[in-house]
Amino acid sequence: MLRKLSTNSFFYTIIAFLSILGLSSCDRDKFFDESVSIPGDKWSSDKEVVFNVDIEDTISPYRFYINVRNSNSYRYSNIWFFLTTEFPLGGMSVDTIECMLANNSGEWLGRGTGKYRDNRIYIRENIRFPQKGSYVFRLNQAMREDELTGISEAGIRLEKQE
Protein backbone atom coordinates (compact mmCIF):
# COMPACT_ATOMS: atom_id res chain seq x y z
CA MET A 1 0.00 0.00 0.00
CA LEU A 2 1.42 3.39 -0.98
CA ARG A 3 1.50 6.15 1.56
CA LYS A 4 1.01 9.77 0.60
CA LEU A 5 3.99 11.98 1.46
CA SER A 6 3.25 15.02 3.53
CA THR A 7 4.19 18.41 2.07
CA ASN A 8 7.11 18.72 4.51
CA SER A 9 8.44 15.24 3.67
CA PHE A 10 8.20 15.94 -0.04
CA PHE A 11 9.98 19.29 0.40
CA TYR A 12 12.83 17.73 2.41
CA THR A 13 13.16 14.87 -0.09
CA ILE A 14 13.53 17.34 -2.96
CA ILE A 15 16.08 19.42 -0.99
CA ALA A 16 18.14 16.30 -0.18
CA PHE A 17 18.05 15.17 -3.81
CA LEU A 18 19.12 18.59 -5.10
CA SER A 19 21.90 18.78 -2.50
CA ILE A 20 23.30 15.39 -3.49
CA LEU A 21 23.05 16.29 -7.17
CA GLY A 22 24.77 19.64 -6.56
CA LEU A 23 27.59 18.14 -4.51
CA SER A 24 28.26 15.41 -7.00
CA SER A 25 28.49 17.84 -9.93
CA CYS A 26 30.61 20.45 -8.12
CA ASP A 27 34.31 20.64 -8.84
CA ARG A 28 34.32 18.06 -11.61
CA ASP A 29 37.10 20.03 -13.33
CA LYS A 30 39.25 20.14 -10.19
CA PHE A 31 42.58 18.44 -10.65
CA PHE A 32 44.44 19.79 -7.61
CA ASP A 33 43.18 22.09 -4.85
CA GLU A 34 45.15 22.50 -1.65
CA SER A 35 45.70 25.31 0.84
CA VAL A 36 48.02 25.61 3.81
CA SER A 37 47.03 27.21 7.09
CA ILE A 38 49.13 30.19 8.17
CA PRO A 39 49.59 29.88 11.98
CA GLY A 40 48.12 32.80 13.93
CA ASP A 41 47.15 34.59 10.68
CA LYS A 42 50.73 35.92 10.55
CA TRP A 43 52.76 35.08 7.47
CA SER A 44 56.48 35.64 7.82
CA SER A 45 58.26 36.77 4.66
CA ASP A 46 60.75 33.90 4.96
CA LYS A 47 58.06 31.19 5.19
CA GLU A 48 56.81 29.62 2.01
CA VAL A 49 53.90 27.31 1.36
CA VAL A 50 54.86 24.35 -0.83
CA PHE A 51 52.75 22.10 -3.05
CA ASN A 52 53.82 18.98 -4.92
CA VAL A 53 51.68 18.19 -7.96
CA ASP A 54 52.13 15.05 -10.06
CA ILE A 55 51.42 15.69 -13.73
CA GLU A 56 50.96 12.80 -16.14
CA ASP A 57 48.91 14.59 -18.83
CA THR A 58 51.09 16.95 -20.86
CA ILE A 59 48.47 17.46 -23.59
CA SER A 60 45.40 18.80 -21.76
CA PRO A 61 45.26 22.50 -20.88
CA TYR A 62 44.79 23.61 -17.26
CA ARG A 63 43.49 26.70 -15.45
CA PHE A 64 45.55 28.03 -12.55
CA TYR A 65 44.16 29.79 -9.45
CA ILE A 66 45.56 31.06 -6.17
CA ASN A 67 43.47 30.50 -3.04
CA VAL A 68 43.67 33.11 -0.29
CA ARG A 69 41.80 33.28 2.99
CA ASN A 70 42.06 36.65 4.71
CA SER A 71 40.58 38.08 7.87
CA ASN A 72 38.93 41.48 8.09
CA SER A 73 42.00 42.63 10.06
CA TYR A 74 44.10 42.47 6.87
CA ARG A 75 45.28 46.03 6.19
CA TYR A 76 45.51 45.98 2.40
CA SER A 77 43.18 45.57 -0.57
CA ASN A 78 45.65 43.30 -2.37
CA ILE A 79 48.43 40.82 -1.82
CA TRP A 80 51.55 40.16 -3.87
CA PHE A 81 53.03 36.68 -4.23
CA PHE A 82 56.22 35.19 -5.55
CA LEU A 83 55.30 31.92 -7.26
CA THR A 84 58.24 29.61 -7.92
CA THR A 85 57.65 26.58 -10.14
CA GLU A 86 60.23 23.78 -10.15
CA PHE A 87 60.08 21.41 -13.10
CA PRO A 88 60.48 17.61 -12.80
CA LEU A 89 63.62 17.39 -14.94
CA GLY A 90 65.25 20.48 -13.47
CA GLY A 91 64.82 24.16 -14.11
CA MET A 92 62.44 26.63 -12.57
CA SER A 93 60.45 29.78 -13.18
CA VAL A 94 59.52 32.64 -10.84
CA ASP A 95 56.47 34.85 -11.27
CA THR A 96 55.33 37.88 -9.31
CA ILE A 97 51.53 37.92 -8.99
CA GLU A 98 49.13 40.50 -7.56
CA CYS A 99 45.78 39.31 -6.20
CA MET A 100 43.00 41.76 -5.34
CA LEU A 101 41.17 41.03 -2.06
CA ALA A 102 38.95 44.15 -1.89
CA ASN A 103 37.27 46.40 -4.43
CA ASN A 104 37.86 50.14 -4.89
CA SER A 105 35.25 50.90 -2.20
CA GLY A 106 37.15 48.81 0.33
CA GLU A 107 34.57 45.99 0.39
CA TRP A 108 36.06 42.54 0.72
CA LEU A 109 35.87 40.26 -2.29
CA GLY A 110 35.47 36.51 -2.01
CA ARG A 111 32.98 34.39 -0.15
CA GLY A 112 32.19 34.35 3.51
CA THR A 113 30.66 36.32 6.30
CA GLY A 114 32.04 37.38 9.63
CA LYS A 115 35.78 37.53 10.17
CA TYR A 116 37.09 35.62 7.11
CA ARG A 117 36.81 35.79 3.31
CA ASP A 118 37.78 32.97 0.94
CA ASN A 119 39.09 33.98 -2.47
CA ARG A 120 39.82 31.83 -5.50
CA ILE A 121 41.71 34.13 -7.82
CA TYR A 122 42.00 33.25 -11.47
CA ILE A 123 45.59 33.60 -12.69
CA ARG A 124 45.89 31.94 -16.10
CA GLU A 125 44.34 29.38 -18.43
CA ASN A 126 45.56 27.17 -21.27
CA ILE A 127 48.59 26.07 -19.27
CA ARG A 128 50.24 22.96 -20.64
CA PHE A 129 52.90 21.22 -18.60
CA PRO A 130 55.89 20.38 -20.78
CA GLN A 131 57.13 17.40 -18.75
CA LYS A 132 55.56 14.49 -16.92
CA GLY A 133 56.46 14.17 -13.26
CA SER A 134 56.33 16.03 -9.97
CA TYR A 135 56.11 19.82 -10.10
CA VAL A 136 56.84 21.85 -6.98
CA PHE A 137 54.99 25.14 -6.51
CA ARG A 138 56.22 27.54 -3.82
CA LEU A 139 54.22 30.57 -2.70
CA ASN A 140 55.80 33.39 -0.71
CA GLN A 141 54.09 36.57 0.35
CA ALA A 142 55.81 39.51 -1.32
CA MET A 143 54.32 42.44 0.60
CA ARG A 144 57.60 43.89 1.95
CA GLU A 145 56.64 43.15 5.53
CA ASP A 146 58.55 40.74 7.72
CA GLU A 147 55.28 39.53 9.19
CA LEU A 148 52.06 39.97 7.22
CA THR A 149 49.02 39.95 9.51
CA GLY A 150 45.55 38.84 8.42
CA ILE A 151 46.24 36.01 5.95
CA SER A 152 45.11 32.68 7.35
CA GLU A 153 45.50 30.36 4.34
CA ALA A 154 47.19 30.32 0.95
CA GLY A 155 47.06 27.70 -1.75
CA ILE A 156 46.79 26.77 -5.39
CA ARG A 157 44.15 25.16 -7.55
CA LEU A 158 44.51 23.53 -10.96
CA GLU A 159 41.53 22.65 -13.12
CA LYS A 160 41.59 20.62 -16.30
CA GLN A 161 39.98 22.49 -19.16
CA GLU A 162 37.60 20.59 -21.39
Image: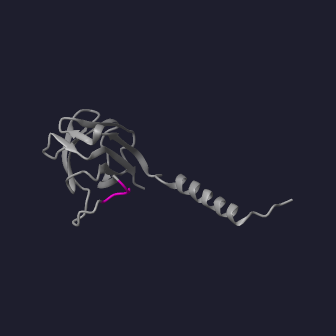
In this rendering, does residue 84 appear at all?
A: no
In this rendering, does residue 17 appear at all?
A: yes
Which residue extends farthest left?
144
Provide the residue span drawn in magenta. 109-114
Q: Identify the image quadrant of residue 136.
A: top left
Q: Position of residue 7 (x, y in %)?
A: 70, 66
Q: Is residue 15 above or below residue 73?
A: below
Circle count = 0
Q: Residue at x 32, y 51 (%)?
A: 65
Q: Residue at x 21, y 66 (%)?
A: 104
Residue 111 on the magenta segment: yes
Q: Position of residue 88 (x, y in %)?
A: 29, 34
Which secondary structure is most common in the magenta stretch?
loop
Viewer-side residue, 150 vs 35: 150
Q: Position of residue 14 (x, y in %)?
A: 64, 62
Which residue extends farthest right?
1
Q: Identify the image quadrant of residue 152.
A: top left
Q: Is residue 89 above or below residue 119?
A: above
Q: Is residue 98 left or right of residue 156?
A: left
Location of the N terminus by quadrant is bottom right
Q: Is residue 36 above or below residue 121?
A: above
Location of the C terminus by quadrant is bottom left
Q: Is residue 22 left or right of residue 2?
A: left
Q: Residue at x 24, y 51 (%)?
A: 74
